[in-house]
Amino acid sequence: MMTRPALLACLLCSLGATAAAQTPDTGFFPKAATFANDVTVTANVALANEYRYRGIGQTNGRPALQGGFDLVHASGFYVGNWNSNISWLSDSNPGVSSSLEMDFYGGYKATTGPVAWDVGVLQYAYPGSRPDGFTSPDTTEVYASAGAGPVVFKYSHALTNLFGFADTKNSGYADLTGTMNTGVWGMTATAHVGHQWVHNLSAASYSDWRVGLSKDLGASTVLAAAWLDTNADRSVYTNTRGRYLGKGMVLISLTRTF
């Protein structure tokens, strides 16, 4: 079944194909060349000492190699893909072979007065084999964010079960992030607080927080370090290897954008 981000990507591709098929005097669609000129493509790759998502460990304390790409149209529409190695699924159940997370998303960004906003849909996919009866970790969320100045608020709402928790459709995650140029050595400071509500499973709900600094090293390369922590329930977020996945830690990453 085609996911919402995949459907959006197909619609954008169809728009480009239709533009190419139109004669110049129709005036309804832009020429294919104009459409292509209005699209910006960027790619990114990152190395981190661990993959943490919403404060929860995804690689059992081991490094993560991550990367993806984005296509952004001048109108504000965008689609993208992001990927990372993971181990949390196999760590929770030896019968699971999934070792990769693939995210596909699409949406629309715009600015109204001082407010920059963004709405979209995101599909988390975890390819691999799983035993019978294992709740699929694949998750679809819709999201909306609004930001003014250095502060951005975002809310994500699950349209499916949440990351393998059964009967958790309609779970939600809210987060508030602030960014500020410190004026010292060109470093940027960030602060974040978020809360994950897990529908029908209150023990899995938790809050997370993070403070950090990043430095642009030039050549579109950014070095970042942050302290992050959670109050996640140990009984829920301790894997079969005995590691508590919500423990506080220093996260260090190096990201290059092309």
Image (cartoon, rainbow, N blue to C red):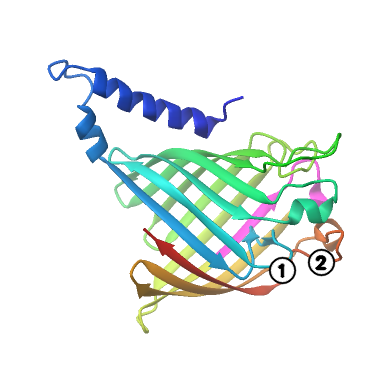
Q: CA distance from mark 1 to mark 2?
A: 9 Å
* Residue located beneath label 2 in the image: 243
Q: Left or right of 101: which side holds 255? A: left
Numbered label attached to residue 242: none
Is 119 above or below relative to 31? below
Q: Position of residue 250 (x, y in %)?
A: 62, 76
* Viewer-closest of 74 and 104: 104
Q: Left or right of 218: which side holds 99? A: right
Name the residue type under label 1: Gly
Q: Position of residue 58 (x, y in %)?
A: 69, 58
Question: Does the magenta run of residues contain 193?
Answer: yes
Q: Position of residue 49 (x, y in %)?
A: 62, 71
Q: Position of residue 8 (x, y in %)?
A: 46, 30
- Residue at screen point 64% across, 34% down: 159
Q: Residues within 10 Å of mark 2 (few under 14, many from 20)?
A: some
* Viewer-closest of 214 and 109: 214
Q: Which residues are magenta?
A: 192-204
Name the residue type under label 2: Arg
* Residue located beneath label 1 in the image: 61
Q: Quadrant of the N terminus?
A: top right
Q: Residues within 10 Å of mark 1 (few under 14, many from 20)?
A: some
- Residue at screen point 21% across, 19% down: 28
Q: Residue furthest left?
A: 25
N-terminal label among 1 and 2: 1
Is 73 above or below relative to 181? above
Q: Quadrant of the C terminus?
A: bottom left
Q: Regarding mark 1 in the picture, which secondary structure is present there? A: loop
Mark 1 and mark 2 residues within 8 Å of each other at the beta carbon: yes
